Amino acid sequence: MATKLHTNTKLNAELTRGITVNPLLANVKLSKTIEVFATVKEMEAAGINVTSLCVGEPDFPPPRAVLDATIAAVEGGETRYTAVTGTAGLRSAIASDLKKRKGLEYADNEILVSNGAKQSVYQGILAFCGPGDEVLIPAPFWPSYPEMVALTGAKPVIVPTTIEDGFLVDPVKLEGYINENTKLMIFCNPSNPTGAVHSGALQEEIALVMKKHCQIAILSDEIYERLVYNDENPHVSFASIDGMFDRTLTVNGFSKAYAMTGMRLGYVAAPAALLKPCVTIQSQLTSCAGSLSQAGGLAALTKVSETEMEANVKIMKEKRDFVVSRLSAIEGLKYFVPDGAFYILPDVSAWLGGDDTEFCLALLKEKALALVPGSSFGADGTVRLSYATSMEELTVAMDKLEQFMEEKRTS
């Protein structure tokens, strides 16, 4: 006898009336980009070719050595669970890389490999924050930061920066946002969405503030640290600053520098006392990262040459310089030239009444060019451009943007 399917909505409502949603979700906001992305999908479904500078993903493939190692892992049967913290080989390679390039000395058991840096970030927040706690987040920020904080029941405290100051954290102003409830600072360097790179000297000033407040841990998101374009302002890890090693969780991964976005591989490095609660969370949440991705990550750190890495950085810098040159031709447009990552955040507040979402929707509908509203990043009146795409695509995009802004100036 066929199984009877229950489709009576009144009955279903009666059966589920006692089910409630976690109240913490009331504090989590939907992304402001939803309307823009929905319009993109509608236009593409209608056969319109949309040029997009939205995605934070390199357009080049992973290095050949990464692909070969992943294929070899498949063929070699490396498809079973690994240790929760990651394979011994990968953790050792990460520790060696951090020592060689950043001067940071971690034991292999002070490395936790996760399913992407995003998981590492959330586990770091969840490990140290809960209801009643506060988390410092410099703005502009990656949109997931405050929502992750809200999911723990803690309160995100936004610390504004300005385009005039290069979107850099002002240590004096930062201290004004600290109180006895402050438990964590999330520090993204280089920054998404601004591309700002905080110098070692500025980080030392920030560290002086942190030293006055021993209850604060620092989560340093360094996923873009390989993508830095100014030799006079190299990336410096926050954990390498005097007095900060024992208080810092250093998050990094393989998505941006090695173009392994879909392979979902990241890590956090921290002293054992800070890492232990993160390991506990991951052991109950996802267990290990994918074994095949870990094989690819090991190859990235041990078989990809610095020459290949530098070539990719050179190409990305050329794209940045091209976008900056095109933006400089738009009269009245304010922007900050980024030293890292692959984003730029121009100020469009002088156009269309300063509403960045309306700006993006109008640009999309009139020119079929998709950008991300800056309000999604806590930067009202700006838009984010990603230049991690082909030069051909960038040329088309900048032509469209320049035409649109000139038309709106004269209309």
Image (cartoon, rainbow, N blue to C red):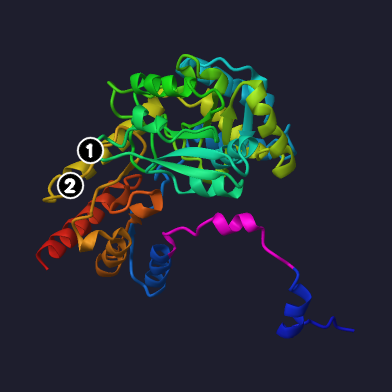
**Res 86 quadrant in image:** top right
Discs 2/1, front:
1
**Residue 138: which disc?**
none
- Crowding around mark 2 (Cα neighbors within 10 Å: few <14, some 14 to 19, many 20+) is some
Could you say where residue 318 lies in the image, as x and y percent from the top left?
25, 37
Q: Which residue is mark 2?
A: 326
Q: Is residue 29 left or right of residue 41?
A: right
Identify the magenta region.
19-34
Magenta span: chief secondary structure:
loop
Give, as a three-letter code, the residue at label 2.
Answer: Arg
User: Which residue is at a point 17% across and 59% down the rendered structure image?
Assistant: 405
- Helix, strand, or loop for circle 1? loop
Front residue of 307/68: it is 307
How crowded is the residue under tag 1: few (<14 C-alpha within 10 Å), some, or many (20+)? few
Q: Can the viewer see residue 125?
A: yes
Q: Is residue 362 located in the magenta-colored stretch of the structure?
A: no
Residue at position x 59%, y 17% in the image: 106
Amino acid at dot 1: Glu
Image spot of residue 77 (x, y percent): 72, 38
Q: Relative to 357, does residue 183 appear above or below in the rendering?
A: above
Residue 268 placement (x, y as % from top left): 58, 30
Q: Would residue 84 be found to the left or right of residue 125 on screen?
A: right
> Residue farthest to the front?
180
State left or right for residue 289 relative to residue 172.
right
Q: How many marks?
A: 2
Which residue in the protein does label 1 denote? Answer: 164
Kindly indicate the quadrant of the structure image that contains residue 312: top left
Query: In the image as oriented, which residue stretches furthest toward the right?
Result: 1
